Image: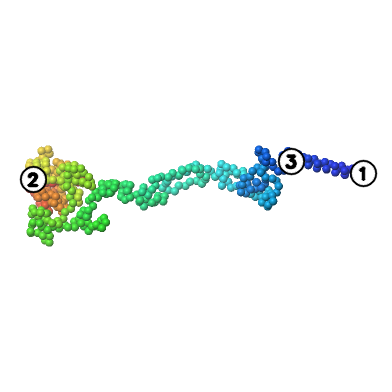
């Protein structure tokens, strides 16, 4: 009897315990889910995600809507609940070397240091920059980096230059080496580049050959029957007759009182000397020759009646050498002192002037002209040269039969 009472008591207590537990769960469910295990979606702030929501977020980063689901299993396998193992396996392992230092993800802070905008510039050498994450910026370019601004043949960052100087495809920036006939002209007179000014048989330009000194013989006589081309021809004077045919001469420039231009008018401004004493320029030697001296002490110039002078003047000797300003002067002083910038030509300069055809221009000069070259074996003689007949001969220093021309460069 006593034993039956105890059994009944135990069953009663256990039943009461189960009942209380059910009532508590029911109360909780009623309090939180309004009597249903399905999350309520009617409230303004629905809450709750399923494990499927969390799994897919980790798996594909797919978004989910809170409370937009039920806790009932779906009809297909893809709707089945995922285990915590499934979800754990989808949590990525974070490598701090792939994460910015300003970011912490799942408790891991990154090692990548954010850096400022590029500060790199074009340089003659490679530039090294530290590894890291670079913020936005501008790597400066330059619109001038084009082929026409890069030296011909030079490769700069893939741009191969064609620039040759002065802004032109070919040439040079130096005005001393740019032809005056080219665009962006310099000081070199390209007008002088002709076959007659380039040595004979020398190829130049496109298919051209020089002719300078190619016909040094004196041409066939025009009036002097004693000479012929076969026998050597006649001198340039040709006995006062016409100039010999085909005799050699080069280009000479007449000096004039006009505006100088290196290309179109090289004879202007008296061959760019500014001195009316200038007469002709030999384009081969570049020497500028004066008109003959005239008057006492070379105070004037004349092509019709040049005055004769002593080469040496001392002790009142040589009245024509006396200059009203400078007193008694030598032939050399008549050039260099009376006419600064000029000098008495040397023997070979006068001889070269004859070779170059000076008499074709100086047809008034039929006399011997003083040179500055003394005779090595006699102190009483110097060399005189005739630009009319090519003769060079001894002249006594006190002779009054020799005229005077002077020479200079620009």
| In the image, farthest residue toward the front | 42
Residue at the bottom extreme, as displayed: 230
Viewer-proximal residue among 52 and 181: 52
Task: Measuring from the top left, give residue 106's x and y in whole percent.
Answer: 62, 44
Q: Residue at x 18, y 48 (%)?
A: 253
Q: Which mark is in front, 2 or 1?
A: 1
- Callout 3 secondary element: loop
Q: Earlier in the sequence, mark 2 or mark 3?
A: 3
Crowding near the residue tagged with mark 3, few <14, some 14–19, many ≥20 C-alpha atoms within 10 Å: few
Does any portion of residue 373 appear in the rendered image?
Answer: no
Q: Is residue 23 left or right of residue 62?
A: right
Q: Tell me what residue is drawn at x 13 percent, y 43 percent.
A: 334
Q: How would you rate the neighbour count of disc 2 (Cα within 10 Å): few for under 14, some for 14-19, many for 20 or more? A: few
Q: Which residue is mark 1?
A: 1
The image position of residue 275, as x and y in percent, is: 17, 42
Instruction: Tell me residue 94's x, y (percent).
Output: 60, 47
Q: Is residue 192 left or right of residue 111?
A: left
Residue furthest to the right: 1
Q: On the image, which quarter does residue 314 sit in?
A: top left
The disc, 2 or 1, on the residue closer to the chain's N-terminal end is: 1
Q: Kindly identify which numbered label has been placed on residue 305.
A: 2
Q: Position of residue 107 (x, y in %)?
A: 61, 43
In the rendered structure, find residue 35 and report the number of the disc placed on it.
3
Mark 3 or mark 1, earlier in chain: 1
The residue drawn where x is 72% and y is 43% is 37
Q: CA distance from mark 3 to mark 1?
A: 44 Å
């Amino acid at each position: 009897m006593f034993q039956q009472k105890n059994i009944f008591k135990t069953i009663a207590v256990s039943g009461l315990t189960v009942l209380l537990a059910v009532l508590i769960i029911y109360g909780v469910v009623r309090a939180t889910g309004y009597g249903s295990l399905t999350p309520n979606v009617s409230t303004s702030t629905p809450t709750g995600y399923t494990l499927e929501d969390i799994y897919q977020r980790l798996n594909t980063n797919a978004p989910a809507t809170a409370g937009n689901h039920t806790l009932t299993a779906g009809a297909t396998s893809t709707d089945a609940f995922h285990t915590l193992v499934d979800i754990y396996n989808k949590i990525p392992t974070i490598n701090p070397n792939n994460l910015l230092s300003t970011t912490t993800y799942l408790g891991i802070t990154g090692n990548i240091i954010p850096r400022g905008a590029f500060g790199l510039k074009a340089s003659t050498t490679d530039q090294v920059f530290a590894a890291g994450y670079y913020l936005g910026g501008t790597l400066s370019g330059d619109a001038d980096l084009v082929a026409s601004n890069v030296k011909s043949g030079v490769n700069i960052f893939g741009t191969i230059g064609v620039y040759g100087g002065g802004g032109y495809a070919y040439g040079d920036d130096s005005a001393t080496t740019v032809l005056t006939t080219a665009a962006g002209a310099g000081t070199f007179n390209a007008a002088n580049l002709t076959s007659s000014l380039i040595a004979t048989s020398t190829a130049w330009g496109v298919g051209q050959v020089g002719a300078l000194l190619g016909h040094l013989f004196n041409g066939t006589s025009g009036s002097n029957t004693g000479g012929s081309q076969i026998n050597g021809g006649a001198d340039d004077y040709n006995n006062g007759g016409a100039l010999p045919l085909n005799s050699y001469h080069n280009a000479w420039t007449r000096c004039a009182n006009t505006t100088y231009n290196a290309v179109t008018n090289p004879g202007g401004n008296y061959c760019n000397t500014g001195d009316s004493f200038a007469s002709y320029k030999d384009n081969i030697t570049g020497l500028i020759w004066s008109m003959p001296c005239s008057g006492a002490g070379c105070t004037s110039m004349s092509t019709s009646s040049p005055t004769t002078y002593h080469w040496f003047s001392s002790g009142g000797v040589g009245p024509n050498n006396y200059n009203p300003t400078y007193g008694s002067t030598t032939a050399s002083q008549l050039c260099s002192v009376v006419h600064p910038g000029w000098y008495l030509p040397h023997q070979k300069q006068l001889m070269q002037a004859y070779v170059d055809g000076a008499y074709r221009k100086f047809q008034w000069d039929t006399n011997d002209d003083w040179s500055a070259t003394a005779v090595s074996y006699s102190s009483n003689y110097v060399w005189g040269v005739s630009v009319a007949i090519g003769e060079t001969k001894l002249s006594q220093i006190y002779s009054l039969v020799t005229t005077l021309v002077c020479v200079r460069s620009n």
